[in-house]
């Protein structure tokens, strides 16, 4: 189902989601964050920050190691119902998604959800990411459930409406699919009208 497996660039752009608006000088900040880590035995959040900086620099396996450490330390020393742990699992899930490990990513998205603590923007990203992975693995019903959860947190998420529209068209739910495409177009996603012209008229 190639037409529903889309917008990877959109999702991968969300990998650096929590750093939007922050002007890190990546390499210098990696060094200073490393210095903090070396002076602190249980600095889980510093590992997370360095992981995100490594992702920006393209050092994906260094980022994976840092996220592993952030999760391990947090689980050993801190509250297991903290939104930070949700962020750590979500970040590792997005990194696995970027590396093409969709099953591993789903497991980490599940772990992020299992923590049970987060904020609306974070839940939007988690459910969108898990839906995308499920689509890549052919679990279209699971993807629909997750995309609909995205819409609970953000009813005007136009890419989610677009992806839902395409998936529902592919599983012969034309009316529902076309309505989601229409909503995506209404919200400003212009590609929705190309899909409508091709499949809904």
Image (cartoon, rainbow, N blue to C red):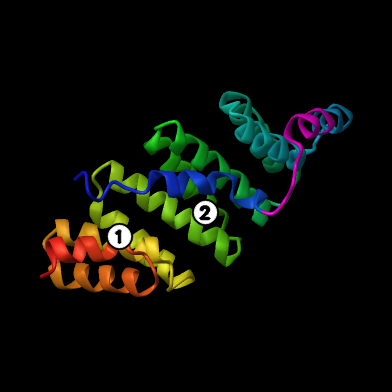
The residue depicted at 64 percent of the width and 51 percent of the height is 18
Magenta residues, start to end: 21-32
The residue depicted at 74 percent of the width and 39 percent of the height is 44
Query: Which image quadrant: the N terminus?
Result: top left
**Disc 1 on helix, strand or loop?**
helix
Residue at the farthest right position: 39
Query: Closer to the observer: label 2 or label 1?
Result: 1
On the image, which quarter does residue 151 sit in? bottom left
Question: Which is nearer the N-term, disc 2 or disc 1?
Answer: 2
Instruction: Name the mark on residue 114.
Output: 2
Marks 2 and 1, Cα distance to the nearest angstrom? Answer: 35 Å
Q: Where is residue 114 drawn, in percent x and y?
A: 52, 54
Badge 1: residue crowd in 10 Å (few <14, some 14–19, many ≥20): few
Badge 2: residue crowd in 10 Å (few <14, some 14–19, many ≥20): few
Q: Where is residue 184 drawn, in percent x and y?
A: 34, 68
Residue highlighted by disc 1: 191
């Amino acid at each position: 189902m190639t037409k529903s497996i889309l917008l990877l660039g959109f999702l991968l752009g969300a990998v650096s989601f929590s750093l939007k608006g922050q002007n890190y000088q990546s390499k210098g900040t990696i060094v200073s964050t490393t210095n903090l880590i070396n002076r602190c035995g249980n600095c889980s959040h510093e590992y997370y920050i360095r992981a995100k900086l490594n992702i920006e620099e393209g050092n994906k396996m260094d980022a994976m190691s840092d996220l592993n450490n952030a999760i391990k330390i947090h689980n050993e020393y801190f509250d297991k119902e903290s939104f930070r742990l949700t962020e750590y699992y979500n970040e590792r899930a997005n990194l696995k998604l970027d590396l093409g490990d969709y099953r591993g990513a789903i497991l980490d998205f599940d772990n992020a959800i299992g923590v049970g603590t987060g904020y609306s923007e974070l839940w939007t990203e988690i459910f969108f990411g898990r839906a995308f992975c499920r689509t890549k693995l052919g679990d279209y019903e699971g993807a629909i459930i997750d995309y609909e959860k995205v819409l609970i947190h953000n009813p005007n998420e136009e890419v989610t409406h677009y992806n839902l529209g395409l998936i529902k068209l592919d599983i012969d739910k034309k009316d529902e699919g076309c309505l989601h495409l229409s909503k995506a177009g209404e919200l400003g996603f212009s590609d929705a009208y190309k899909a409508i012209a091709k499949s809904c008229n």
